[in-house]
Image (cartoon, rainbow, N blue to C red):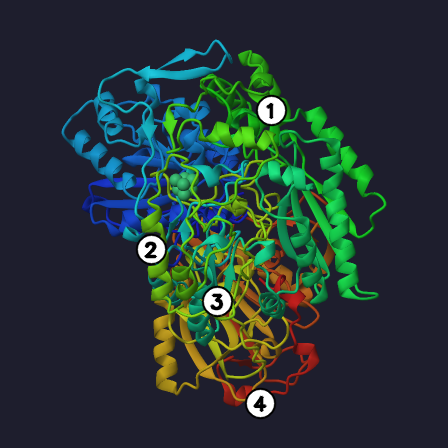
Amino acid sequence: MDSLPLLADHPYASFLDQVEKPARYAGGEVGSVVKDWASVEARVCLAFPDVYDIGMSHLGFKILYKLLNDDPRTLAERCYAPWVDMEAQLVKRGLPLVSLESARPLRDFDVVGFSLQFELTYSNILTMLHLGGVPLRAADRGEDDPIVIAGGPTATHPEPIAPFLDAIVIGDGEEKATEVALTWTRLKREGVPRRERLVAIARLGAVYVPSLYATRRDPDTGFEVVDRPLVSGIPFPVERALVDLNRYPFPDESPAGGPEAIFDRMSIEIARGCTEGCRFCQAGMIYRPVRERDPEQIVDTVMRAVKKSGQDEVSLTALSTADVSCISPLIKKVTERLTAERISLGVSSLRAYGLEPDLLDELKRVRATGLTFAPEAGTQRMRDVVNKNVTEEQLLETAERVFSRGWGKMKLYFMIGLPTETDEDVRGIVETGARAAGAGRKAAGRGKPVDVTVSVSTHVPKPHTPFQWAAMDTLSEVARKQQLLRDTVRPYRAVTLKTHEAHASVLEGVFARGDRPLADVLERAWRSGARFDSWDDQLKLSVWEEAFAHAGVDRAKYLGTLPVTARLPWDHIDVGLEEGFLAREYRKALQNRLSPPCGKVAGTFVHHTNLEDARADERRLVCYDCGVACDMTQMREERLTFLDRLGAHKRSLPLVTGAIAAAPPEAAAPPEAAAAPEAAAPPEAAAGAAGEPARAGDAAPSRPEEAPGAAGGAPRAAGDAPRAARVPQGRGGFRYRFRFEKTGPVALLGHLDVVRELPRVLRRVGAPMTYTAGFHPKPDMTFSPALSLGVISLDEYVDLRLERDLDPAALEALVASMTAASPRGLVFRAAVKLGPEDPSVSKLIAGARYAIAFARSAIGGDAEATLAARCSAALSAASLPIRREIERLAKMVDVRQYLVRAEVGGPEVLSALARAGLAGDLVALDVEVDIRGSGAVKSSEVAAVIAGEPGGAPGAITPPPHRAVRLELFGRAAPAGSAAGERLSLLDLERARRVKAAPERAAPASLAADAG
Ligand code: SF4
């Protein structure tokens, strides 16, 4: 049943709190930009085909959002795929999918730009188009429909999704996004027909317009390939766009303060591209050449981003961060600056050989969990095949170093299904893990726990990689190899094996190397219910089986070995590689031959970390003439300049890498750092591509729990966190109590999200908090009891410690500045300084007053009289039992024990409702309840026992549609344990000091969840 609308004028207002994580759809984050539609020439909806939590970590999205909104001619708004519960609501109610900023349907925009990160998000693109009111197929769109474009790593092999897109941007999106949007709207204003507008877009270059190309069936493979352009003057093949990154500094701000994103930190792209040449990694091929951002610009961006975001953790990201030429002096410089601010620094994608002892010591100070590495293959032969430059000796040495420092866990990522793989290679995966555990046990010492987790995914051959012609293992072969892994691991108790469900990987493999006829399969599967196919619990295999069968498409042809001479469905997309380069690499792979990293001094695997060494080394830089034509002289010069700018003139102790010249290879953290949606990656398309291209072999890179490094929380890259150590403070600083309100979108934000946000608000306004002591220091603060989602509050409190001693005027100014630095609806009203003797807010709180509002029509008749009678009955009752369910466990709660007062709300309450943003013909209850250490009741339970109807499970009572507003939290000016007493303002310290807090008053953490 719908509640009273919480967000005025939002189309989802009446049911937002009926869906999981409603704040995903509410907008209002700090840094979100709402521009006047009439003031711009082109309006772009950046559409991410996965949930908010994943899309919000995407770097390319952030780049394009800032770029388009900084341009006075354009605006950008965001839209993420609605989770299945929200989709069901929209369908049921006939409502469109709308953007976060202005709540407009996708069909209202001039441009809808999708980010193509991963093949298994294609079905979500169809959902978003359909719900957004945009015809699914490009061929069905009319003159006034938006242009639907896309970009991202998957845009380099787009045929299965091509019929649903008007245009696809290939390569970097920084310039193309604006160019496409403005060209499209200018021509539309001039009355140019849609098809001619599309031709003009295609002629911009780096844009593929599928409808303007003819296809034909290739006799060798049976694939439908793109054959020729249908109009003159459009490119064939379509070459990618490549920008000078330093003309587009990484954004120092982006929307923040909504529900927690999978990567909850400020990530800064420091380079694009990778030199390592892993043969399974598409990112390493399509983002060539490596382009490094100016380190001075990076340092400036980091410092501004910290200030604007309020984040206390920054991450420097690249496909392989350890291979950025100036990474050591850069980390040193950034660390120096951040240490003063007490900000942690994470560095993604360090590798096994990069973990020098001093760096591990640093890591150990801030991380309790284990570390993660990605050797990818279990034998040296297989690592040579995939060009993973790491030796087992390096891996074992790293294991020793890790476990000797007290870590008890280490995680290793591998793939099965790689070309030429034998059973010995498969068993080698477990055996490598076992040897790492053995080395670790020796290093850890007697009795110390040692656990090595071996996580094994299935390799998916990706277009534009040397393995694009290789066969993918069949499901039965994957199952056999997984069983072999399980059999092999049995004797090794220190090794934990994790294998991944392979059905999704096979589907990914089909769509990765798929052609245009797969669009029919996709549409049919989508119409039959395919959604969020990268989420194991959402993938509907039977739906896909039926769709393939119905279209008469044989999946086997997409999964087998392809002739190197065949024309492929992605050959019309030119990512810059010379014809023959991939085939040469493929042949080398089949001969177990390595290709050392390019762009580095021949014979070395790490860059010089100081000017002196770099200048003295006159050896050539390695190049394979892959086709992207790097200027090696300029590359060398640029690196010298960067070292100079960082002041790295003389040799000193390396912070990150030790020179291991001559020793080959290293590696552990893969370019699949690429897999992490948050790691650096370009905004290859208007839609915001950026982001890590899905890693070949990862079953579900876009899914938090599945994607190693990408989403699972555990950073994939070794390290992901050498940090500027935060100084544990423990009860230092100065104590204050703040009063604030939660209305609008913030009332839909979970309590933990608000807890995360507050320290950031304070950082944004330059008033950092102190941290607790201990291994994982946290901002030192205590909140008043948490509210249920959707409950508004006009009277919330938090006790916290700030570093600075503020006089009353400064404190008042601080309070005034905090609201502007907060998400919409978080409003700070007052603050007082606490003395050491002042009891904490949790000890003082003894009760709450709520207004519980109903639409008059929901009560019926003489609503006030009805409610008054119900209040009398409730107060006269000896008990008011109600069933409460928490995580499927039910218990009975007697609301009467807590109910102090209940009456019909008068004018004061109605005006409070208006202040809380509630409008309409309302009638309200005005209730007061006790909050005790032993428990509390929810406002919904009070609404139920007074105005609801029993039904459903025994003891269950359903309240009428309502909206609760916490009007007041208070203490009692009476001895602890007494039933009542004069109410005490929590800001009235004089009186509070006279009230002796007793344990009975203390509201335990568990109470928090029940008190709303
Ligand atoms: S041109 Fe040479 S140095 Fe540049 S990416 Fe290609 S192989 Fe590497």
Name the residue beneath numbered marker 2.
638
Residue positioned most to the right: 491
Between 355 and 385, the one lying in front of the other is: 385
Quarter of the displayed picture in which ligand 1 can be seen:
top left
Name the residue beneath numbered marker 1.
471
Image spot of residue 242 (x, y percent):
32, 40
Kind of residue sitting beneath label 3: Asp
- Which image quadrant: the C terminus? bottom right
Q: Quadrant of residue 384?
A: top right
Image spot of residue 598 (x, y percent):
46, 44
Mark 2 and mark 4: Cα distance apart in space: 60 Å
Between 877 and 32, the one lying in front of the other is: 32
> In the figure, is residue 469 to the left or right of 137?
right
Mark 4 and mark 3: Cα distance apart in space: 30 Å
Q: Earlier in the sequence, mark 4 or mark 3?
A: 3
Q: Earlier in the sequence, mark 1 or mark 4?
A: 1
Are dots 4 and 3 in contact, CB under 8 Å? no
Under circle 4, the secondary element is loop
Kindly tell me whether mark 4's CB lies below 8 Å from ligand 1.
no
Q: Quadrant of residue 649?
A: bottom left
Foreground mark, 1 or 4, reads 1
Foreground mark, 1 or 2, reads 2
Mark 1 and mark 3: Cα distance apart in space: 45 Å
Foreground mark, 2 or 3, reads 2
Q: How many marks?
A: 4
Foreground mark, 4 or 3, reads 3
- Name the mark on residue 312: 3
- Name the mark on residue 837: 4
Kind of residue sitting beneath label 4: Glu
Under circle 1, the secondary element is loop
Foreground mark, 2 or 4, reads 2
